[in-house]
Amino acid sequence: MSINVVIIDDEKWSRGVIRRFIPWNEMGLSLVGEASDGMYGLELIDQLHPDIILTDVKMPRMDGIELLSHIRKNHSDACVIIISGYNDYSFVRDAMRLGGMDYLLKPIKQAELMDALQRCLQKISSRAQTVPSMQSSITLDQGYYALREDVSICLKAGNIPLLEKRLQALAAHLSSPSMNQRSNLVAVYCSLTEEMQKIRLDSGLTGNTAPPYVFSTGTTAEQMISYIGLQLAQTLQEINDISDARRRISISDVKEYIDANWQNGITQEQVAAHFGLSQNYLSKAFRASEQMGFSEYVIQLRMEHARRLILDYRLPLKEVGAQVGYTEQANFYKRFRAYFGMTPGEMLAKDDNEKQQK
């Protein structure tokens, strides 16, 4: 299971250094959010419940010590690493008193960051994983939910032009005085990102590789929606491209490939990978074209080849199963009888009797 991380720092270069220093996949970490001030950082934490938080001390509107204090008051056991350009004892004392894992000075050293993260991982693995119940002042209204439903319909339909119009309407709605709150913007962003990830995975794509949106003091609904809109449109385009490629696939080409490779123990997974298809799509398309499943077709090839080996080539029966891909003789006999209604020996005896009668 991936460990979720949030970075909160008002300096863009500092966030970039942290991203570059951390071997995310190797450590099993996932960057789920970024913010350039403490208030948006707080909203990200309330919405995303990260396991590890890397936060600067000196930031606009809410500093790292205030942020850490809020986290602890809400009973969050997230692992917090404080990063600062100030070697101030009072900061260090307050950070440690509030349960900070470490206090790193800028410029950040990779070895120190890795050491702090490793201790966080050890702490996380040693405790039962519980999700804190953190409250956020979300005030989304019925108008939002209606527009949000329209966006979901556009995503399911794969309609990019209409999606862009619905997102513009959503941005306008979120920009109204009653809706333009940090908690609302973060909640909507998390909701749309989650839906995008689900659509990508359901379509056989990898998770979104774009960096998280960076919430900052001047973040507007239009900026946030524009960013996530580009990611959603890209996802739909990737899905449409895959669908176009699938439609161009000829089942006759698939059969030709199976015919040439079935004796090598080829699987449906291997065939799907060869043609760049999902197993689910290949299974449905093959059955629709041939009125039989992939496995049934391979069994048919094996059985018909076995019949030729027995009747035309008079191969010893004990060798036939291995020749058509069965490692266990009993399994071959079972399949053979289910397919032909008789055992290999019975088929051979029947053929001999028919030839003698001629």
Image (cartoon, helix red, strand yellow):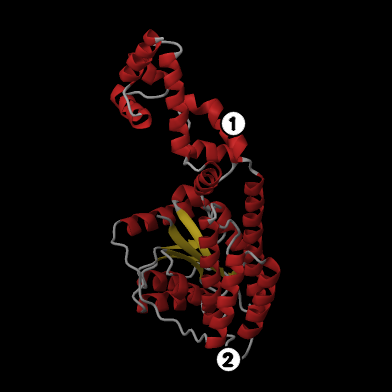
Pointer 1 or 2: first along the chain: 2
Crowding around mark 2 (Cα neighbors within 10 Å: few <14, some 14 to 19, many 20+) is few
Circle 2: element type: loop
Q: Quadrant of residue 217?
A: bottom right
Toward the viewer: 272 or 102?
272
Q: Position of residue 41 (x, y in %)?
A: 51, 74
Crowding around mark 1 (Cα neighbors within 10 Å: few <14, some 14 to 19, many 20+) is few
Q: Amino acid at mark 1?
A: Glu
Q: Position of residue 88 (x, y in %)?
A: 48, 70
Which residue is label 1 attached to?
256
Residue 172 seen in the current view = yes
* Quarter of the image with the N terminus in it: bottom left
What residue is shown at x 41% (from left), y 71% (from top)?
95
Q: Amino acid at mark 2?
A: Ser
Mark 1–mark 2 Cα distance, whole angstroms, equals 62 Å
Toward the viewer: 208 or 250?
250
Q: Position of residue 346 (x, y in %)?
A: 31, 19
Toward the viewer: 47 or 65?
47
* Quarter of the image with the C terminus in it: top left
Q: Position of residue 31 (x, y in %)?
A: 51, 60
Q: Which mark is residue 328?
A: none
Determine whether label 1 and label 2 are within 8 Å by CB: no
Q: Quadrant of residue 164?
A: bottom right
How many numbered callouts?
Answer: 2
Q: Is residue 177 above or below residue 122?
A: below
Query: Does residue 315 appear to the left or right of 166 in the view shown?
Result: left
Toward the viewer: 86 or 118?
118
Q: Which mark is residue 178?
A: 2
Circle 1: element type: helix
What residue is shown at x 31% (from left), y 29% (from top)?
334
Residue 316 seen in the current view = no
